[in-house]
Image: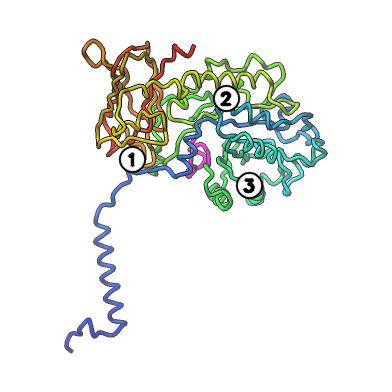
């Protein structure tokens, strides 16, 4: 029988031959090594970029624990103990803003299971308390106050629940948890952050994929915070301690057993040392301004978010000492790093210099440095004195800077001042002693492709005292 012309073959024969060719192609493709994903390939989402620009947040702990002088509730406290006389969420948010916060997270339900919103799915909430005759809604008050103050808003909903009788049954409790999550994510406007806390989760597995899918239905742009060991696919990660510092090189991309993900750090610490809830006669625990500035330098100054824990008292207001300390902290940061304190805009430049975007005092612009290594050199019309350097990287295309240095011209030669690796969102390097010079330069010693510099700034901390 003569061979058949493929062009005149029956349709079934042509389909068979096409499938054979496709199988051969796929087999050959499998022999070609797949291009492995590398750290610089991983890029942030627009929501993550916006969140990282917020830099400082405040998380509010206020519940039955506030009235019982304790940090951990066991779920047995009657709802009647929650009865603040003068709740003032406007005061909370204004105080947080004075401290530099740009977003606020409310603990809507802590581990004791008491909900600060009138959930339709439990009787253990503010609706069973005498506060506002059971008609109050702390989440509504806090979210409205945050937005009036110009702050973004988010919520914390503890997976661990020490009160609800459904908790021992994972199926029944997960349904309950999802119902509360739906209430929070659909009734209170945009949520910038959703906090997942892993406390009490030893031996318990939650379906976090399903939980976050439910959240994304109503809040597609929420940044989900969780410890890396708790939830693999979260958008932000815990620093690993509650002292508010980043003790290691801060790379935004982490490797979870070969799974790479952009996951910036949030470092949380309470305004009162190790106390998330308010306690009476506790003034000695309040962080000093110097301690708070040091925390800022080691969180925001190392490319992380600083999340300050604030605790209203049993009247429903932040203590005046806390309000004053937040204001003092905010003022101290402005004296150190306010845009009017930045010395680099004084450098000689021309309007046509593309690198000017790196020292124009505007983080909304950036300089695209040459590939692999580059240098930004500034000359001043007269000597300037500084003791700290602030560098911001443009992260839209990933974290590109892998090594850098800063030098100053002194006695006819370039004097090394700083040598570092990770820059990320913001890096603050503090010198051991102030230096005076007419020339300073930033050297990008190793970059992946072209790195972007949003800002290169220098400050004189001694002038802020």
> Judging from the image, what secondary structure is the residue with disc 1 in?
helix
- Looking at the rendered structure, the number of numbered marks drawn on it comes to 3
Between discs 3 and 1, the one toward the N terminus: 1
Whether pointer 3 and pointer 2 mark residues with C-beta atoms closer than 8 Å, the reply is no
Left or right position of 124 against 377: right
Question: What residue is drawn where x is 16% and y is 88%?
Answer: 2
Give whichever of 66, 420 is nearer the camera.
420
Which residue in the protein does label 2 denote? 99
Q: Which mark is residue 40?
A: 1
Q: Quadrant of the N terminus?
A: bottom left
Classified by dominant secondary structure, the portion drawn in magenta counts as loop
- The boundaries of the magenta stretch are 224-238
Residue 212 x/y as whole percent: 55, 48
Q: In the displayed orientation, state which residue is furthest to the front.
A: 351
In the image, residue 23 sits, relative to residue 282, either above or below, namely below
Identify the residue shown where x is 36% and y is 27%: 456
Cα distance between the residues tagged 3 and 2: 29 Å
Earlier along the polypeptide chain: callout 3 or callout 2?
A: 2
Q: How far, Cα to Cα, is label 1 from label 2?
A: 34 Å
Instruction: Locate residue 434 relative to residue 204 in the image: left or right.
Output: left
Residue visible at 55% across and 47% down in the picture: 208
Residue count near mark 1 (Cα–Cα under 10 Å), binned few <14, some 14–19, many ≥20? some
Q: Position of residue 295 (x, y in %)?
A: 50, 21
What is the number of the mark on residue 181? Answer: 3
Asked whether 186 or 6 is in front, the reply is 186
Q: Is residue 227 magenta?
A: yes
């Amino acid at each position: 029988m003569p061979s058949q012309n493929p062009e005149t073959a029956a349709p079934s024969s042509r389909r068979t031959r096409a499938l054979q060719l496709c199988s051969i192609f796929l087999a050959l493709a499998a022999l070609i090594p797949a291009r492995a994903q590398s750290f610089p390939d991983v890029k942030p989402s627009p929501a993550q970029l916006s969140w990282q620009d917020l830099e400082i947040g405040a998380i509010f702990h206020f519940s039955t624990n506030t009235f019982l002088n304790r940090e951990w509730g066991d779920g047995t406290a009657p709802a009647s103990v929650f009865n603040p006389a003068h709740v003032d969420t406007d005061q909370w948010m204004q105080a947080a803003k004075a401290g530099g916060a740009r977003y606020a997270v409310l603990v809507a339900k802590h581990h004791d299971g008491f909900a600060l919103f009138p959930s339709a799915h439990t009787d253990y909430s503010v609706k069973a308390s005498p506060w506002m005759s059971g008609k109050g809604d702390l989440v509504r008050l806090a979210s409205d106050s945050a937005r009036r103050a110009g702050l973004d808003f988010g919520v914390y909903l503890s997976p661990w629940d020490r009160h609800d009788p459904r908790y021992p049954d994972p199926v029944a409790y997960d349904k309950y948890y999802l119902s509360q999550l739906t209430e929070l994510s659909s009734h209170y406007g945009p949520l910038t952050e959703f906090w997942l806390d892993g406390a009490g989760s030893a031996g318990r597995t939650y379906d976090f994929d399903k939980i976050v899918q439910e959240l994304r239905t109503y809040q597609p742009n929420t940044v989900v915070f969780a410890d890396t060991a708790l939830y693999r696919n979260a958008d932000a990660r815990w620093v690993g301690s509650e002292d508010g510092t980043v003790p290691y090189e801060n790379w935004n991309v982490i490797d979870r057993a070969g799974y790479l993900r952009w996951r910036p750090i949030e470092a949380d610490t309470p305004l009162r040392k190790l106390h998330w809830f308010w306690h009476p006669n506790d003034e000695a625990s309040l962080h000093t301004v110097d301690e708070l500035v040091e925390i800022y330098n080691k969180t925001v100054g190392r490319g992380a978010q600083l999340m300050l824990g604030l605790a209203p008292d049993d009247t429903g207001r932040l203590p005046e000492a806390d309000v004053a300390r937040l204001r003092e902290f905010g003022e101290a940061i402005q004296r150190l790093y306010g845009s009017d304190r930045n010395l680099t805009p004084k450098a000689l430049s021309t309007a046509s210099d593309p690198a000017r975007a790196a020292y124009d005092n505007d983080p909304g612009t950036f300089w695209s440095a040459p590939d692999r290594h580059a240098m930004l050199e500034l000359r001043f019309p007269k000597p300037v004195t500084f003791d700290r350097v602030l560098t911001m990287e443009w992260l839209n295309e990933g974290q590109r800077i892998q090594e850098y240095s800063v030098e100053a011209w002194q006695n006819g030669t370039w004097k090394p001042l700083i040598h570092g690796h990770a820059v990320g969102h913001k890096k603050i390097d503090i010198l051991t002693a102030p230096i005076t010079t007419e020339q300073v330069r930033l050297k990008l010693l190793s970059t992946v492709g072209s790195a972007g510099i949003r800002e290169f700034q220098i400050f004189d901390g001694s002038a802020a005292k």
